Each structure stands twice: as structure tokens, then as C-alpha cells.
Amino acid sequence: MRKRVLLVPDGMADEPQAALGGRTPLEAAETPAMDGLARGGIVGLAMTVPPGMPPGSDVANLAVLGYDPAAVYSGRSPLEAASIGVELGPADVAYRCNLVTIVAGVMKDHTAGNIATEKARSCIDALQAALGDSSFEFHSGVSYRHLLVWRGGAVVPCTPPHDILDRPVEDYLPGAAAGAGAGVAAGSPAARLGELQRRADEVLTGVCPGVHAWFWGEGTAPSMPRFKDLYGVSGAVVGAVDLVRGLGRLAGLDVIDVPGATGDLCTDYGAKARAVVAALDGHDLVWVHVEAPDEAGHMGDLHEKVRAIERVDAEVLQPILMSAGHPAVMVVPDHLTPLRTRTHAAGPVPFVISEPSPGAGGGGAMAFGESQASHTGLFVPDGPSLMRLFLEATG
């Protein structure tokens, strides 16, 4: 069986930029490896976020892995709970606990300055010591990404912090996503969660000055089939963020640990490529996720987004293509993260599949980018269709 690699540069897709002469960051970046795939492969646009669903990395990565999010999605944080080995019972609810920076009531940074994991762990340990009980548990993750579990709790609609950068947070506290805002009923689940977030900030003021807690990504334990049962191929995942690792674990993929993979702009791109090549020895397909383009998008930093894309091309894709066995590759961002809005957006994303079987369609592209993908006329309506196309075209 031909070996395959699914490369997902998170949030790589974007809008045309005046500063780039009307090109997108992907189109402006120097990407000889991706462009080479495009000239000889299948290029098109794919929808990775079903209509009516939020354009988060959770929903979109489920889709690019070949799942129907509308059928299996139950929230973002349960995926992260699976990554760090936290089991959820049928009545339990998981929340993402971001460490963030709030200044004068305004959300200034959803990463608390890309807080170091060691420092972040001390913050989460303090929260668990002060507030943890039979109902609430705080669990450490990586950098700013952590987990709150509410045993026997409730699903309270919450707002992702990266959606409200430079906005006052008052109208986005727990419960506000459902329209309750600051007027949530006393004793309600939203009021209880909001009080916990307030108390968490008090604890952090004493141990991690300038750092705040923010709850979001609510969800219950999902039920999803194994990837091998769906597609008949064995798989592994190489990624740093807990969401991706948790999704891989729930899909029955082997989760590969990569020293130096951080989930931010300073990740070790080369280490990820080496891990992919090594994992191909024992697996039919390896999914490699790179968070950096998405982080640059949330920062609104054009230079860093272009640079992250170029590093994915040179330090991840090129070594994979040059490896023994020459695996087939599909490159596809999970969603758009426009620099203009600094948050995720729904819409078609470009994809490229290398060395397709004759007659697969989607040819004629001269480079890999949003415009070229649109010009081929190939449109794939959902994630499962895209995964089937990848497997069938490279079979």
C-alpha cells in the first residue's frame, strides 16, 4: 500500500492583502515544494466547516481527517481531555481554560504572551489547589492551553478569547454566548461558571500577576468511529496541540511525541518532519499538523504568517517529499484565519494532492494558492469527500 501524509498548516488560508499586491499570504510566500505539487497534482477548493457550525480548529480538523463534524462533534475541550488522558463520564463537561491577558477589562492576548509551559503549570496547579473539588478539576496542558472539567456539570455557552481580541470582556463572560450576558440568573450553571472564573482570576492575581483565566470550548464526551474502520488504513498523528492529539487518540491513531514541537511560532519544524518520516515505517498514513500559521493569523502579523508558511514548505514538506518511499501528500489548511479579523472564518480552503492517478481532475494549476485552486474548477463539498479523493487518487 502506498504511504500517505496529510499535512495541515493550521489557518494558512487567508484573504488577498493590499500590502502583497492583492495576493494572499500563501500566494506571496516562497513555497517551491507546494507549487511543485500543484503543477503535477490535483488542486481545488474544499469546504471543511459544515453550514451552521462554528469555524473552529476542532470542527475543521475533524473534517480534514475525513469525519463528518455534524455527526460526531460534541465540543472542543473533550478532544483536549482525551489528549491528556482525562476521562469524561456521561454527565461530565469539559471546558478549555485559556491563560489570557486582560487589561482594563479588554481582551489583549488570548495566549498570555505565549506563556511558557512551566510557568503555566504553576498557575494551573494553584487553581487546582485553591478551587479544585469534587465538582471542578483543573488540568495542565501546553503553554496557554489548559483544561477545566466540571463533573456532573452543565454545558454553558462560552466565547473563544481569540474571537474578542481588543474588545471589552464584560459582555462575553460565561453565559453571554447564549444571550444571557451579565444578567444570568443567580445559582444557574452560567452564574456558577462565571463565579468560578472570577475566583480563578483572584487566585492568579496572587501567583501569576497579569494572567487571567478564560473558560470556553464547552463539550461532552464524543463517540466516533476509528479512522481505520472508516477508511481501511492505519494512521498516526504528529502534532503539538492537545486538540489535535486528542482527536487523533479518539480516532484510534497512534500519537507521536515530538520533542521541540511547541504549537507556536517557534516550534521545531524539522523535528516534525523527521517524526513523520519515522512514523511512515509502521503506518499507512501520517497526519502532521502545524499550528504556526494560525498563531500568526491571530496575531494579525502578516510577516510572521508568510514566514510560517515558508517554513512549513521548506522544513516540513520538502524533507517528507525527499524521504525514502516518496509518500503521496495532501496539503490542506483546516480553515481560514484572516489577518483582517484575527480569528477563524468559514469558507472554502485550497488543497493540493500529489501525483494523482490519471483522470483525477483538478489539474492545470501553476502554483498552490487560493486563486489557482479556484481556477481549476474542482470543488469538494465536505471533509469525508476530500479524504476519499485523497485515498482514491493516490491508491
Image (cartoon, rainbow, N blue to C red):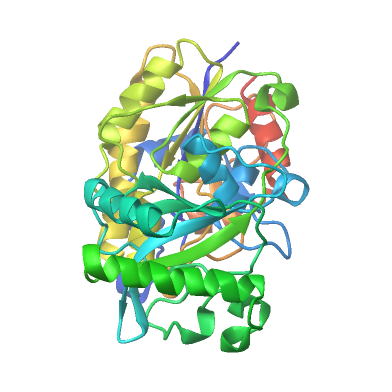
- Name the image quarter holding residue 390: top right
Examine the rendering and report whether any part of residue 93 can be seen: yes
Q: Nearer the viewer, residue 43 or 280?
A: 280
Give the residue drawn at x 62%, y 73%: 190
Q: Judge by depth and name the residue closer to the eye, 320 or 223.
A: 223
Answer above or below: position of 75 versus 285: below
Location of the N terminus (image quadrant): top right
Residue 153 in picture, x, y percent from top left: 65, 58
Whole-percent x, y for residue 67 in the image: 69, 40
Q: Position of residue 206 (x, y in %)?
A: 23, 68
Q: Is residue 278 left or right of residue 4?
A: left
Residue at (72% x, 36% y) in the render: 224
User: Which residue is rendered at x = 46% and y = 46% of the image?
Assistant: 366
Q: Nearer the viewer, residue 236 or 387?
A: 236
Q: Is residue 300 visible?
A: no
Residue 208, picture quadrant? bottom left
Q: Is residue 43 above or below residue 392?
A: below
Left or right: residue 275 versus residue 163 is left
Q: Quadrant of the C terminus?
A: top right
What residue occupies the far right of the structure in this picture?
A: 71
Looking at the image, which is closer to me, 221 or 27? 221
Picture coordinates of residue 391, whole percent (x, y):
65, 26
